[in-house]
Amino acid sequence: QIVLSQSPAILSASPGEKVTMTCRASSSVSYMHWYQQKPGSSPKPWIYATSNLASGVPARFSGSGSGTSYSLTISRVEAEDAATYYCQQWSSNPPTFGAGTKLELK
Amino acid sequence: VQLQQSGAELVRPGASVKISCKAFGYTFTNHHINWVKQRPGQGLDWIGYINPYNDYTSYNQKFKGKATLTVDKSSSTAYMELSSLTSEDSAVYYCARHGNYFDYWGQGTTLTVSS
């Protein structure tokens, strides 16, 4: 199965800062999806097919990448962005998730 | 669109449990229902999916023999039965609809396996 490695595991940022988190796949994938999860809540679709924002996601979020390397960028972090972000692929079975990047606000 | 899951379960080791996921707001047979496991403080693990249109199922190899997926089309409800429960099965279980990605999720069902 394809293993997704997310880095960093924990990302600490100040409001207004630009941040980027990455997701590396053990084999090439066609696209990557991203989900946001806050404590006690279900994951929410956040970015789909590498670069498309899900409904309601602020425009300060963006996604990019290809092959084995993908990233999620927040242009100016806000307090409400504190959460864990998971990448996910289904280019091959079984679908797999990364271990997550936890974004903390300073 | 909404997926409404059954409530928290406390079950004994060795027992089985059946969790439900009732779909609202769309044509149930048009989308696969997936199940995902999340252990406390851990990441997300895909269990498998069922196609409500034809009852076709696909399982993650690590959950074969542990999970059984079924649907009741008449009530737009998907079910996951977990058998021979151990403490390793204690987790939150989510159902999720798959369009081109996991676009809608249930609220999660917490399963605690304890004597």
Image (spheres, coloured by chain):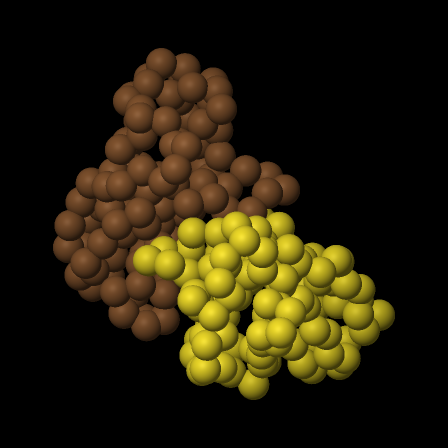
Chain colours: A brown, B yellow
Is residue B26 rendered to the left or right of residue A72? right
Q: Of A42 and B44, which appears nearest the observer?
A: A42
Compared with B22, A22 (above or below) is: above
Q: Of B52 and A48, which appears nearest the observer?
A: B52
The residue at 49%/74% (across/down) is B52
Taking the view exactly as shown, the residue that stands out farthest to the left is: A67
Residue A79 in percent (x, y) is at 48, 20
The residue at 42%/19% (across/down) is A78
- In this orientation, does residue B45 appear? no
The residue at 59%/67% (across/down) is B76
Q: Of B35 and B86, which appears nearest the observer?
A: B35
Quadrant housing the C terminus of chain B? bottom right
Q: Quadrant of residue A65?
A: top left
Q: Quadrant of residue B4?
A: bottom right
The residue at 43%/52% (across/down) is B103
Taking the view exactly as shown, the residue that stands out farthest to the top is: A16
Q: Quadrant of residue B99?
A: bottom left
Residue A10 in percent (x, y) is at 43, 36
Taking the view exactly as shown, the residue that stands out farthest to the bottom is: B65
Residue B62 in percent (x, y) is at 48, 77
- In this orientation, does residue A52 appear? yes
Compared with A45, B48 (above or below) is: below
